[in-house]
Image: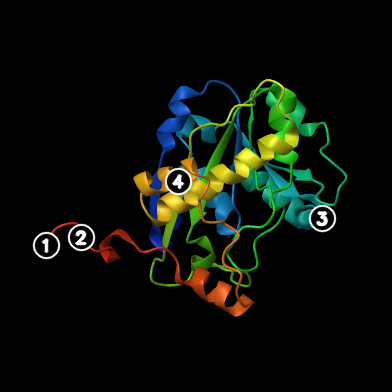
Amino acid sequence: PLHDALPILRRETSMRIEGRDVFDTIDGPVVIVANHTSHLDTAVLLTTLPLERQRKVTVGAAADYFFDAWWRAIGSALVFATFPIERHGQGLSDTPAKLIADGWSILMFPEGTRSPDGWTRRFRPGAAALALAHDIPIVPVAIRGSFAAMPRGRGWPKPGRPPVHVRYGRPIRPRDGENTLALNGRLAAAVAALLDEDATDWYAAARRAATGSTPPSSGPNVANWRRVWESSAGPASRRDRPKAWR
């Protein structure tokens, strides 16, 4: 089903993918973590991973949403190889540990649910705890444009092939003596820096990240309608961007 989904995504959206070569430096399972604003996000990530990663990746999905009805549980498990995660403080089951031991990578959305306005929410520590417990790297990912392409309430992307950008970042490896809170903070900062990089350019974003001045991915402190309005604009496509020459 994933192979069938990519042509559909490319037909319905203008996909732009950056940074997949980060997987060339990683052997074995990883935790893949991204911001989450749309039901498009899972399909976008699973179909843009390198092919060898697509063959053995599973998705942590909210138990109280995707597994509350048998038809939804079966559908998500068959299409996206999901397993349930409790998002109300009950912690992780032993399922992720078994999957990692068997060589599977795990995709997680640490916000726990889709953003209602396109900006990130607080990252929950499950992904960081999993990486620490099994000493495996985390690959941060920034997704821009999926909220504008298919916000809450829509079952299909908007017409006109809206742009969706996927940017993979360098792996984050647990440090000696690092706790879950510290690793989770580094993870959130990495996703914010990738979002900044995609919105601007690598050099400017790298300088801001080095000085701790990356714009917060949680967005501006303004009225909710303005937050939604800004996210609904989506990223500029390549043809919309001004050329560097005249």
- 4 or 2: mark nearer the eye: 2
Q: Earlier in the sequence, mark 2 or mark 3?
A: 3
Q: CA distance from mark 4 to mark 2?
A: 21 Å
Q: Earlier in the sequence, mark 3 or mark 1?
A: 3
Residue 76 in the image: state x and y as whole percent: 68, 50
Residue at 61% across, 45% down: 188
Mark 1 neighbour class, 10 Å CA radius: few under 14, some 14 to 19, many 20 or more: few
Report if the CB atoms under discs 1 and 2 are less than 8 Å apart: yes
Q: Which residue is mark 1?
A: 246
Q: What kind of element bears circle 3?
A: helix
Q: CA distance from mark 3 to mark 1?
A: 54 Å
Amino acid type assigned to the residue bearing label 1 in the image: Arg
- 4 or 1: mark nearer the eye: 1
Residue at 62% across, 78% down: 223
Q: Which residue is mark 3?
A: 64
Quarter of the image for residue 175 reads top right
Q: Residue furthest left?
A: 246
- 3 or 4: mark nearer the eye: 4
Q: Which residue is mark 2?
A: 243
> Residue 102 vs residue 225: left or right?
right
Q: Which residue is mark 4?
A: 167
Residue at 64% across, 62% down: 115
Amino acid type assigned to the residue bearing label 3 in the image: Asp
